[in-house]
Image (cartoon, rainbow, N blue to C red):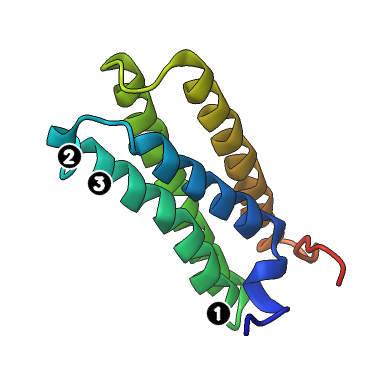
Amino acid sequence: MKFKNGFRKLIVWQESHKFTLMIYRATLTFPKEEKFGITSQLRRAASSIGAQIVEGSRMSTAPHRKIYYERAYASAAEVDNFLELASDLGYLNEEIYKQLLDQLNCVSFLLFKLIKSCSSKTPVTTIPS
């Protein structure tokens, strides 16, 4: 049974999880020779975003949470790089590429706001139960 509270209530985690699923689906069509190359890199970097958010959400102080959220933000930049490469190599069609970038921008914006909230007294945004 899933916990109903914790990281699952964080909108940024929900959006990053959605993004990771999108990446896994998009990379299914990548060439087989890229299995241990760009496919693996994209999947690991995308899944790292959510994992860092989860780890950060369990830290007891805002400065400690901020470190993990900044790592997630950096992983989002890594994904952006690999998406550009995949697009340039012709592995992604324009529509899928745009959808992935739109979702990545959403996640990055939410992470940016979450990082800022660790420096202020603003509460973290969650979905009501």
Is any part of residue 39 visible from this angle? yes
Q: Residues within 10 Å of mark 2 (few under 14, many from 20)?
A: few
Instruction: Label 2: state its secondary structure.
Output: loop
**Percent coordinates x, y for residue 119 in the rendering:** 67, 61
What amino acid is labelled 2 in the image? Gly
Q: Nearer the viewer, residue 97 or 124?
A: 97
Task: Tell me the residue that label 2 is attached to.
Answer: 37
What amino acid is labelled 3 in the image? Ser
Instruction: Label 1: state its secondary structure.
Output: loop
The residue at the point 50 percent across, 41 percent down is 22
**Percent coordinates x, y for residue 12 in the rendering:** 65, 54
Task: Give the distance between the C-alpha atoms of the residues marked 2 and 1, in whole angstroms.
Answer: 33 Å
Residue 9, quarter of picture = bottom right
Is any part of residue 77 visible from this angle? no
User: Residue 40, labelled with which disc?
Assistant: 3
The residue at the point 64 percent across, 56 percent down is 14
Q: Is residue 98 above or below residue 51?
A: above
User: Residue 106, labelled with which disc?
Assistant: none
What amino acid is labelled 1 in the image? Met
Q: Is residue 126 above or below residue 116?
A: below
Q: Is residue 69 above or below residue 60?
A: above
Position of residue 125 in the picture relative to residue 72 (left or right)? right
Question: Which residue is the extreme one toward the left?
Answer: 33
Task: Tell me the residue that label 1 is attached to.
Answer: 59
- The answer to whether the residues at label 3 and label 2 have Cβ atoms under 8 Å apart is yes
